Amino acid sequence: MNVTSSDKSVLPWLRSYPEGVAWNSAIEPQPLWRLMDEAVGRFPDLIAIDFLGHRTTYRELGRLVDRAARGLVEGGLRPGTKVGLFLPNCPYFVVLYYAVLKAGGTVVNFNPLYAPEELRRQVEDSETEIMATLDLRSLYDKLLPLLGNSPLKRLIVCSMADALPAPKRWFFAIAMRRELAAVPKDDRHVSFEALTHNAGNFTPAAIDPRSALALLQYTGGTTGRPKGAMLTHANVYINARQCALWFPRDETRQEKMLGVLPLFHVFAMTTVMNWSLTAGATMILLPRFDLKGLLKTIRRCEPTGFAGVPTLFNAILNHPKIGEYDLSSLVFCISGGAPLPAELAKRFETLSGAKLVEGYGLSECSPVVCCNLPHGPARPGSIGLPYPGTTVEIRGTDEPHGLLPLGEHGEICVRGPQVMKGYWKRPEETAAAFIDGAFRTGDIGYIDPDGFCFVTDRLKDMINAGGYKIYPRLVEEALYKHPDVADCAVIGVPDPYRGQTVKAFVVAKPGRNLDEALLADYLKDKLSPIELPKIYAFPASLPKTAIGKIDKKLLVVDATPERRTP
């Protein structure tokens, strides 16, 4: 790429862009299912999925996708039909995701842990007509009441036992039979086996990737109530290709991406599933998070890549027997979903020998916007450089929300081919989410002179103490440096004098004791007096979301003063 000095002043990240990657790389929009067909053509005999020891090649995976796509069309799927995936990580998720897209439908991701009312609300809002799930009572029984009493008309029921390797399949059939759902045989139900019982000769639906919806990805966004981000085929396809430019396939090894984050979350969907197709990588899928099982899987499968959230890397570091596990197969790890404390990153890299880079994204951006460099030095505390074709702007938080110069804090706004079409059936919220065509993230940050981007905090999480702006992330970074702190979270709570003050929730490492006086003394030379926590709580653990992020919303609800320091 030819870069002029004027380009670098307008797009400062070009000064630091990795060699061999052009910021203005031309990525032609394609239907998202092309990722699958391209992977099958390039890597037919490589292992695409390793699910608890059951391995599927790319050729086998492609055949299942085609058969499922034909079965969906024969079963009545029309262009634009909403198909929900109510599934944990398993081969069925990958197959049906791409089959729905190839048939012309729109995927709607559902969290298998949803309560019945949450499930009903999303089914009704998204107008989901078909839902895929496992034959487990814990999942199926939540969906059955919605059949005929909501837009939901049909269930695709997948056999958990059939997804397992032979020994585990036999054990499951015997030991877990009480967990299996009683699925009636009627026209409202179809088994995955019946859905795919065809020759698989199938012509994909003709779509315009720039306008056709690939995905309704539900997110709380910046305004609380979940809403569906409308992601087009072009949005998600291009973001996968941007990831491939940033993390190219290493021809000297078989890439293996560890998938413990749920694929229904947009972070894992792109960095685990879609990226793996671009690199011919093996997706090592785990249906749920279990730390001991995760560590055993790393030892058995020797993944080269691992996408996680900070609390997940922190849990590995704090495992009491972590020294017994070999993590040396890991080459690169990606942290997202929440701020990555610099101290945590440094400790994990020392332990594993892998490069741990922080990235940044949102459901509305398919999701990746920025990432640190997988090769070369990372900028501590930074979310990295904007992806190819992506522009990051910093705008004032007050009217008229003008553009701010380098180094000044403001709201992070994004332009790029991965930015959503808008919110499903919410034109007013869509309009409010953009300013001059740029997506407003609701995050506060800045860009340094070399173009590296930094997130200071969520706009809504920023603490205003007597007019002084306090960023919880900076306080948390300081707390994580204490050797006895295992986990922490900082929020603002009402204060009669300042308006708000700082409250810290701190979890001590096993066998260690912490108190407010000890931490106040430790932090006094690391934070300004106004930033020092005035209230402490010392819970045994912190609440987590479905992907393992600390759930600050629950902390705010339960943020009664407990231990106030002077």
Image (cartoon, rainbow, N blue to C red):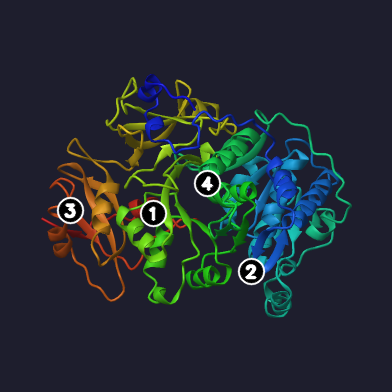
User: Which element is circle 4 on?
Assistant: loop
Residue 34 place in picture, x, y as percent:
71, 40
As drawn, 202 above or below 257:
above
Name the residue carrying label 1: 554
Upstream in the sequence, badge 1 or badge 4? 4
Quarter of image, res 213: top right
Q: Mark 3 points at which residue?
A: 534
- Looking at the image, is mark 3 or mark 1 earlier in the sequence? 3
Residue 444 at x, y percent in the picture:
34, 36
Q: Residue at x 78, y 54 (%)?
A: 64
Q: How far apart are marks 3 and 1 (CA)?
A: 20 Å
Amino acid type at image mark 1: Leu
Callout 2 amino acid: Leu
Q: Percent from the top left, x then y, of residue 440?
A: 43, 31
The residue closer to the viewer here, 496 or 196, is 196
Q: Distance between the residues labelled 2 and 4?
A: 26 Å
